[in-house]
Image (cartoon, helix red, strand yellow):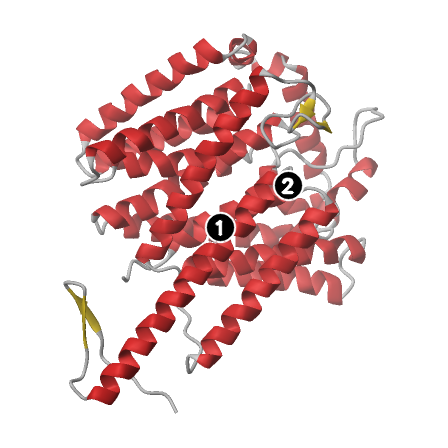
């Protein structure tokens, strides 16, 4: 039997019914809620930090660990909900597209619509883990979400410092002991995927520095963290990362201008100049070479190859337009449609949107569009709250998601488990209701 007890928080004091029994029950309920929120913050932080440090969670052992961790997190959360007297679930506008996309994957497996069911089943387990992390992020209350974002921003700053040190003392190995193919940066085997990580974490620090009412010492610390993280995006020499970050900053400034905070927008512009100077000072010249190649992108062999892959991928859609070839099937099916000779394995389309259309068809692609539209609709609504906590809680994740969505036009960051998990967590926070 469930009881509804009116509780409100006023100047730090809990006010409930004056009946001693009800007051004790109310205090127990609040403590249970606080314990659940702390559990969510710790669990989400541990999984995300592990995924990043484990080379982006691309190895089978790391993926399995992330999936098991998400499953244990879900079981413990359900147990806590049951022992507290009932399941409490806060609604989120992104639940519907996330659930429907998962249902499409299940249908591909159950009805044999996937060209290779085993590969799709493995992708389903990863997507289920992302869904669990997204669910918990959307259940975080204001204070819990702020703590989680603080942990992620501090962790991002630490990873950026490590990446700088490793870059300056690079011996061809990640962590100075694990061999890499030469394009690694930080804990990632590919510098573009490292840039994708920083695209999502940098705006969190900058949002905390520029949020209304932030104290001066805190502003300075968060500003330094944001500048260092952003500088590593340019030092990594990821063209897609540079473009995505520039778009982020334009979007960032536009949101402040829309809120009639032009002074903050100019402050952000000064920060961007500082990031540029720091990148040029630390960089070894590769960044300027990559920036120069952006003036004529079609003459770049790598960019031209990616455009060819995307064009070939679109030829795959008419053969299975409704439900696609099956999630995770691109590297298996693509060789039949490849228009150029190569001995290399083309493992991804280097365009997450095209690949989603190929693997899940029009139905899955529609869910992706639905998800993005709801993300920005709910995020903008949350920003209108105009409170300090609401701004820092929503602005950073929303801008970070913008960067990775832009970068996804030219890379496959959302197929790197660590980046995909962080993306879903930020989406859950940005779109979550602003109730305290």
Note whether 168 is above or below 17 in the view shown: above
Q: Nearer the viewer, residue 420 or 410?
A: 420
Q: Nearer the viewer, residue 187 or 120?
A: 187
Local crowd size for mark 1, using a 10 Å CA cut-off: few (<14), some (14–19), many (≥20) = some
Q: Residue at x 49, y 28 (%)?
A: 160
Local crowd size for mark 2, using a 10 Å CA cut-off: few (<14), some (14–19), many (≥20) = some
Return the mark for residue 204: none
Q: Residue at x 65, y 51 (%)?
A: 361
Give the quarter of the figure containing the C terminus. Answer: bottom left
Residue 44 position, x and y percent, is 50, 54
**CB-based contact (under 8 Å), mark 1 and mark 2:** no
Where residue 353 sits, quadrant-wise, is top right
Residue 241 position, x and y percent, is 51, 27
Could you tell whether 71 is left or right of 16 in the image? right
Q: Is residue 363 visible?
A: no
Element type where label 2 sits in the image: loop
Q: Which residue is label 1 attached to?
A: 45
Q: Is residue 314 visible?
A: yes
Say whether disc 1 or disc 2 marks the residue closer to the N-terminus.
Answer: 1
Q: Which residue is label 2 attached to?
A: 54
Note whether 384 is above or below 338 in the view shown: below
Residue sticking out furthest to the bottom: 1
Element type where label 1 sits in the image: helix
Q: Residue at x 27, y 29 (%)?
A: 220
């Amino acid at each position: 039997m469930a009881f509804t007890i009116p509780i409100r928080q006023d100047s730090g004091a809990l006010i409930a019914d004056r009946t001693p029994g009800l007051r004790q029950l109310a205090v127990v309920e609040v403590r249970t809620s606080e314990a659940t929120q702390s559990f969510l913050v710790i669990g989400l932080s541990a999984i995300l930090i592990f995924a990043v440090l484990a080379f982006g969670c691309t190895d089978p052992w790391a993926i399995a660990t992330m999936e098991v961790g998400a499953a244990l997190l879900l079981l413990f959360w359900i147990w806590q909900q049951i022992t507290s007297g009932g399941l409490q679930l806060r609604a989120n506008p992104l639940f519907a597209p996330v659930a429907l996309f998962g249902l499409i994957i299940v249908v591909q497996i159950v009805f044999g619509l996937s060209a290779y069911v085993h590969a799709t089943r493995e992708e389903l387990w990863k997507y289920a883990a992302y869904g669990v992390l997204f669910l918990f992020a959307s259940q975080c209350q204001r204070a819990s979400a702020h703590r989680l974002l603080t942990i992620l921003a501090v962790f991002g700053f630490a990873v950026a410092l490590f990446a700088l040190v490793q870059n300056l003392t690079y011996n061809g190995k990640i962590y100075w002991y694990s061999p890499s193919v030469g394009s690694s940066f930080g804990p990632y085997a590919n510098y573009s995927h490292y840039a994708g990580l920083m695209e999502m974490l940098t705006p969190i620090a900058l949002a905390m520095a520029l949020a209304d009412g932030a104290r001066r010492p805190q502003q300075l610390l968060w500003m330094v963290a944001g500048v260092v993280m952003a500088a590593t995006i340019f030092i990594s020499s990821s063209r897609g990362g540079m473009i995505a970050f520039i778009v982020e900053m334009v979007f960032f400034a536009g949101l402040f201008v829309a809120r009639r905070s032009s002074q903050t927008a100019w402050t952000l512009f000064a920060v961007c100049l500082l990031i540029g100077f720091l990148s040029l000072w630390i960089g070894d010249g590769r960044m300027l070479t990559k920036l120069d190649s952006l003036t004529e992108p079609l003459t770049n062999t790598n960019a031209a190859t990616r455009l060819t892959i995307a064009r070939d991928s679109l030829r795959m859609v008419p053969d299975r337009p409704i439900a696609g070839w099956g999630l995770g099937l691109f590297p298996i099916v693509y060789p039949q449609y490849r228009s150029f000779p190569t001995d290399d394995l083309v493992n991804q389309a280097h365009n997450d949107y095209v690949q989603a259309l190929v693997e899940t068809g029009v139905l899955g692609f529609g869910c992706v569009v639905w998800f993005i539209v709801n993300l920005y609709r709910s995020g903008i609504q949350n920003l209108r709250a105009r409170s300090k906590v609401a701004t820092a809680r929503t602005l950073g994740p929303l801008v970070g998601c913008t960067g990775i969505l832009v970068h996804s036009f030219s890379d496959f960051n959302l197929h790197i488990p660590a980046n995909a998990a962080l993306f879903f967590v930020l989406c859950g926070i940005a779109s979550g209701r602003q109730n305290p």
